[in-house]
């Protein structure tokens, strides 16, 4: 099945493009949470953030940062919400960052996830240790620790 976002990047499907360059394309979400909800995608087809080549991560987030500023200004918003789903809840299997304008008391509260707690400090520390161990044992190209 063809990728809907690759079709937009290629100009084969219509979209309201707000930015395009050699690395990325940004366009309005067809089903926005609020007007001004933008999707930022890499031109290269990658499905998730972990699949994005390391050299492309900085440029991708530089564009996301610029879009946060632009969406806030253009939509007279108080700020933005930025989100990326990786596999779960990812409606199109092409990496995309949501940049959503936010206003105080806009009614968007906890719409993505229920909050939880750890049973105690020991459980919390065990989870932290597990994540730290995974960082240390990741492939060099995937690790934060150099």
Image (cartoon, rainbow, N blue to C red):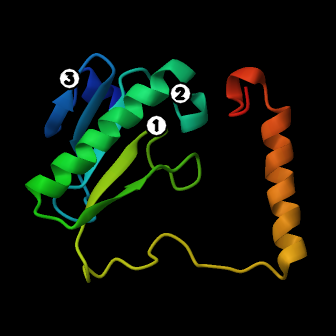
CA separation in Å, label 3 and label 1: 18 Å
Depth order, front residue of 101/44: 101
- Badge 1 is on which residue? 95
Please state if 18 lies on the left or on the right of 37 as rendered: left
Please state if 136 lies on the left or on the right of 113 as rendered: right
x 21%, y 67%: residue? 78
Q: Position of residue 118 (x, y in %)?
A: 78, 78
Residue 42: image tag: none
Label 1 near label 2: C-beta < 8 Å?
yes
Q: Circle 3 sits in a helix, a strand or a loop, which is it?
A: loop
x 83%, y 36%: residue? 136
Please state if 146 lies on the left or on the right of 53 as rendered: right
Choose top left, top right, bottom left or bottom right for residue 81. bottom left
Mark nearer the N terminus (3 vs 1): 3
Mark nearer the N terminus (3 vs 2): 3
- Badge 2 is on which residue? 52
x 56%, y 23%: residue? 54
- Badge 3 is on which residue? 11
- Alpha-carbon neighbours of circle 1 within 10 Å: few (<14), some, or many (≥20)? many
Q: Position of residue 96 (x, y in %)?
A: 41, 41
Q: Comparing marks 3 and 1, which lies closer to the viewer?
A: 1
Q: Position of residue 84 (x, y in %)?
A: 47, 49
Q: Position of residue 139 (x, y in %)?
A: 78, 25
Q: Circle 2 sits in a helix, a strand or a loop, which is it?
A: loop
């Amino acid at each position: 099945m063809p990728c809907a976002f690759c079709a937009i990047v290629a100009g084969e499907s219509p979209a309201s493009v707000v930015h395009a360059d050699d690395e990325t394309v940004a366009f309005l979400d067809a089903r926005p949470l609020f007007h001004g909800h933008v999707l930022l995608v890499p031109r290269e087809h990658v499905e998730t953030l972990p699949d994005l080549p390391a050299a492309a991560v900085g440029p991708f987030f530089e564009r996301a940062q610029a879009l946060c500023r632009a969406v806030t200004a253009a939509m007279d918003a108080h700020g933005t919400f930025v989100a990326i789903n990786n596999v779960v809840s990812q409606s199109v299997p092409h990496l995309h960052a949501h940049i959503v304008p936010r206003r105080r008391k806009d009614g968007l509260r906890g719409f993505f996830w229920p909050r939880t707690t750890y049973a105690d400090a020991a459980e919390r520390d065990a989870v932290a240790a597990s994540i730290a161990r995974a960082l240390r044992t990741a492939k060099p190209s995937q690790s934060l620790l150099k």
